[in-house]
């Protein structure tokens, strides 16, 4: 179902949807008019719209414009990480954990074979559970047995290595990484300091 039809079915204007979802009006107008596909939007935008329409993110993506795209758009891993960190900041730890688990996003990415995204979300949930003294969700124990074949370092570290190999910061960033992320070969040292 197209976004235009979703708005009509809920008797909602683009302006009302923008106000309720906190998605910019121009972005929504482009989506409704077909200038932009929802599969090309950020995770945060899709998330906000899914909440307004009481759909999962996957349902919103699958039902967009008659399912014109079969494979969902995959942003760069750096953009994905940034979006996740912003969502944690906006929602707070507990609401983020609840929403990720309720929407089964970790399994969705795993089933698509988008392993870095799946591991990143699982690591984030596990880290936030530890920070808030919450038990781990056992639904993902099968995924916890795996990790990426090669480490993924933050882009700024890799750029610095290319610019000046003598000042290789990979060991330092590895040593200071959050253990829940490191378990999956993702070097992540800071999830709270986002702008």
Image (tube, helix red, strand yellow):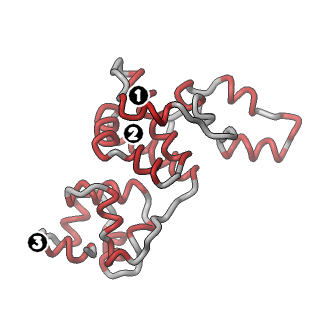
Outermost residue toward the front?
Answer: 142
Q: Disc 1 or 2, which lies upstream in sequence?
A: 2
- Left or right: 30 in relation to 176: left
Name the residue tied to disc 3: 11
Pick the front one: 59 or 94: 59
Q: Residues within 10 Å of mark 2 (few under 14, many from 20)?
A: many
Name the residue tied to disc 2: 88
* Residue pictured at 88% horizontal, 35% vertical: 166
* Residue pictured at 32% horizontal, 77% vertical: 65
Are the residues tagged 1 and 2 within 8 Å (C-beta)?
yes
Pick the front one: 132 or 182: 182
Q: Where residue 51 sits in the image (x, y, percent)?
A: 24, 54
- Left or right: 54 in relation to 146: left
Pick the front one: 130 or 67: 67
User: Label 1 to label 3, Cα distance in Å?
Assistant: 38 Å
Label 3 secondary element: loop
Name the residue tied to disc 1: 128
Which numbered disc, 1 or 3, marks the residue closer to the eye?
1
């Amino acid at each position: 179902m197209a976004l235009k039809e979703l708005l009509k079915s809920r008797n909602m204007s683009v302006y009302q949807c923008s106000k309720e979802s906190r998605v910019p009006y121009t972005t929504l107008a482009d989506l409704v008019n077909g200038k932009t596909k929802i599969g090309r939007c950020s995770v945060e935008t899709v998330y906000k719209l899914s909440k307004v329409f009481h759909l999962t993110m996957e349902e919103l993506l699958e039902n967009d414009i008659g399912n014109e795209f079969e494979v969902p758009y995959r942003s760069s891993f750096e953009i994905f990480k940034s979006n996740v960190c912003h969502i944690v900041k906006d929602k707070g730890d507990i609401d983020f954990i609840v929403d990720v688990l309720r929407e089964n996003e970790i399994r969705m990415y795993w089933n698509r074979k988008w392993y870095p995204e799946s591991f990143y979300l699982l690591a984030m949930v596990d880290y936030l559970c530890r920070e808030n003294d919450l038990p781990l969700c056992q639904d993902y124990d099968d995924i916890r047995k795996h990790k990426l074949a090669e480490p993924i370092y933050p882009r700024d570290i890799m750029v610095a290595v290319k610019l000046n190999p003598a000042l290789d910061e990979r060991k330092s960033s590895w040593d200071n990484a959050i253990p829940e992320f490191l378990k999956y070969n993702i070097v992540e040292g800071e999830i709270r300091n986002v702008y």
